[in-house]
Image (cartoon, rainbow, N blue to C red):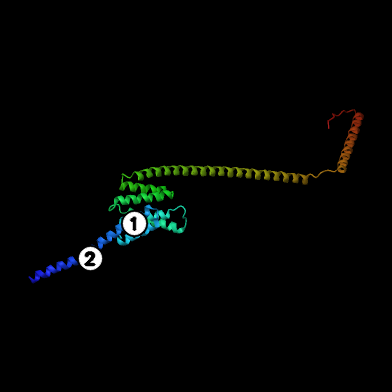
Amino acid sequence: MKRTAIIFFALLAAIIAGAPESFAQAESNRQERNFITEGNKLYNEGRYRAALLKYQDALKANPSSAAGRYNLGLSQIRLGSNPSDTTQAAKDMLQSGCKTMEQVAQMGREKPQLAARANYNLGNVAFNSEDYSGALNYYKQSLRLNPDDEAARRNLRITQLKLQNQNQDQNQDQNKDQNQNKDQDKQDQNQNQDKNQNNQDQNQNRDQNQNRDQNQQQQPDINQQTADQILKAMENKENQTRARVAAGNQGDKSTGRNKSRKNW
């Protein structure tokens, strides 16, 4: 009987010891839900920073709260995506929001619907950053987890069109660059040909000038006085020749012999 009483009291002690833990868990869940509800109200009013604080309180109450983490990431993305705020703090906030949302996106096995929405929001961030390849992957993952999400399907189609146009523009730019390179090569080739032709012309002119200079050195100009002297010497030589011929003719007549004449 005494042994039975000891076992009974031991069980009672275990029940009493476990009661505060169960009560604390229930209280934690209640606080989590309250904080999330308050945060959602603030978020819908556009008070994203105040909502962020409520979601942080929800995570303090329950660090494993998937809803609290998702809503926290959504608030961070909202604050970091404000077009009027281009500060580094805003960029850091957006980066933190994407990291928080990535954590939820990995919960596809436990929370498929919430993970699908997380991938959808990450796709929107990537799309707005013109990272269309990244956005496409996020939308595809969202549809794998929730094939009925028409918003994700619509955004997927828009992203595919964006990628198609982007690829066409890149191909056009590439072809344009190739054509410019071809034109530049052709222009360079023409310039080289012109340069070679100019060099050849310059070499030819230089050779001609050198030949002309050499001829001028070998055959100097004759002045008028020298020319007169040469002409007079030629006339004297011609007169002497004629005189010899005339004397020879007379000798032939005296001997009775005739000699043939040659033109000269």
| The furthest residue to the bottom | 2
Kindly identify which numbered label has been placed on residue 209. none
Kindly identify which numbered label has been placed on residue 38. 1
Which residue is under mark 2? 20
Q: Nearer the viewer, residue 222 or 244?
A: 222
- Image quadrant assignment for residue 231: top right
Residue 190 at x, y = what percent? Answer: 60, 42
Q: Nearer the viewer, residue 98 or 131?
A: 98
Q: Nearer the viewer, residue 160 or 232?
A: 160
- Is 224 placed above or below 115 here? above
Which element carries disc 2, helix, strand or loop? helix
Which residue is drawn at the image coordinates 49% and 44% (left, top)?
A: 173
Image quadrant holding the C terminus, namely: top right
**136 left or right of 171 in image:** left
Image quadrant holding the N terminus, namely: bottom left
Residue 142 at x, y = what percent? Answer: 33, 48
Q: Amino acid at mark 1?
A: Glu
Q: Is residue 154 visible?
A: yes
Q: Nearer the viewer, residue 143 or 53?
A: 53
Which residue is drawn at the image coordinates 9% and 70% (left, top)?
A: 3
| The furthest residue to the left | 1
**How far apart are labels 1 and 2 at the CA level?**
27 Å
Which residue is drawn at the image coordinates 22% and 65% (left, top)?
A: 20
